[in-house]
Amino acid sequence: MAKSSGQLAGHVARKRFGQNFLVSTGIIQQIVDAIAPRAGETVVEIGPGLGALTEPLLACIDHLQVVEIDRDLIARLRQCWPAERLTVHEGDALAFDFSALKRTGPLKIVGNLPYNISSPLLFHLVESAPVVHDMHFMLQKEVVDRMVAEPGSSAFGRLSVMLQYHYHMECLFTVPPDAFEPPPKVMSAIVRLIPRDKRKVGADEATALQGGRAKNALFAVADGDTAQHAENDTAKDEALFARIVAAAFGQRRKMLRNTLRGFINEADLTALDISPTARAEELGVGEYVRLANALTNTLT
Ligand code: SAM
């Protein structure tokens, strides 16, 4: 099923489905090595397309589940692999309930994602974080940069905060346009996401913080402030946390005293040691959690 270089096996790539098919065998191998699928794991591929990743994944495991929207490609996939090896879920990954999947082992979600829906898909997948072991995705490099961005940088936004709250993330390597057919106009990158065990994060990072501030610690905390740090890892009301983050970044050029007016007044922001004149990107994930938890405490 997988194409040889430059070929699309008679299929015309559909722009509306973000179809840029992988043709570089070297890159395909690098991706499968990063995913490292093992017998017994439940692996789900989003957007299998012509099977560039599907085929090498099925060389490692007995059974794979895929979610594909393009009916022509679904028919091809069903012709190529029997149902005992490949379960094809026909439909939109944005509406697919990954947490309801039948699992026989740790759940891995992978895919060379359609770039036109990557942000909403990443937000949708957050709902599955509690049941996921790990995820590996090909995305536009600019999106990966935003996912792993640090507070204070222009790339740090709602996507960064929401994903960093739920996952440890790592950009593994970049992929040039000529690895695809047709080639996209942008650079791509492979990112690994591992859900945080939020109850454990405080302990992990408290250990890392011993003897000084941890390099790249995700949550901004004062040195030696590990007990408070642990408390600030988990939002007591995650829906409120998400609403606050959305409001702050909804108008990212405005000051927090304006964007968060519906949640908190200027004096209370100051009392929380958060500058009312700061802008959304200046706060770290932990500060958004602290803010949400302070408001949860007030409301309950
Ligand atoms: N995995 C193949 C590869 O690497 O060559 C194809 C990747 S292509 C970038 C994206 C794939 O996602 C296509 O097969 C496309 O039809 C599929 N797709 C696009 N939108 C989708 C959606 N909303 N739900 C499920 N699949 C979708």
Image (spheres, rainbow, N blue to C red):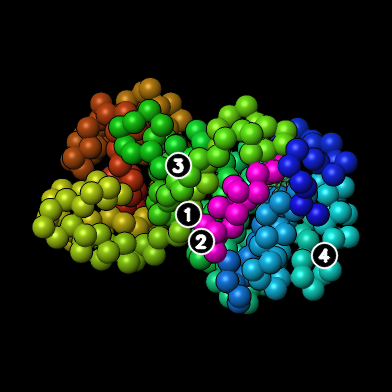
- Asked whether the residues under the numbered discs 1 and 2 touch, taking CB atoms below 8 Å apart as contact, a structural biologist would say yes
Tell me the SS state at disc 2.
Answer: strand
Q: Nearer the viewer, mark 1 or mark 4?
A: 4
Kindly state the secondary structure of the residue where label 4 is placed. loop
Residue under pointer 1: 193
Q: Position of residue 205 (x, y in %)?
A: 25, 59
Residue hosting label 4? 81
Which amino acid is tagged 1? Answer: Leu
The residues bearing labels 2 and 4 have C-alpha atoms spaced at a distance of 25 Å
For badge 4, the amino acid type reads Trp
First reached walking from the N terminus: tag 3 or tag 1: 3
Q: What percent of the width, then of the height, locates residue 67?
A: 73, 56
10 Å crowding of disc 4: few (<14), some (14-19), many (20+): some
* Mark 2 vs mark 3, CA separation in Å: 16 Å
Tell me the magenta residue range: 19-36
Mark 4–mark 3 distance (CA, rounded to whole Å): 35 Å
Q: Is residue 258 above or below residue 132?
A: above
Residue 87: quadrant of the picture: bottom right
Three-letter amino acid code of the residue under disc 3: Met
Seen at 60% across and 41% down, the residue is 118
Q: Cα distance, mark 1 to mark 4?
A: 28 Å
Q: Which of marks 1 and 2 is nearer the N terminus?
A: 2
Q: Name the residue under label 3.
A: 147
Q: Mark 2 points at which residue?
A: 134
Inter-mark Cα distance, 1 to 2: 6 Å
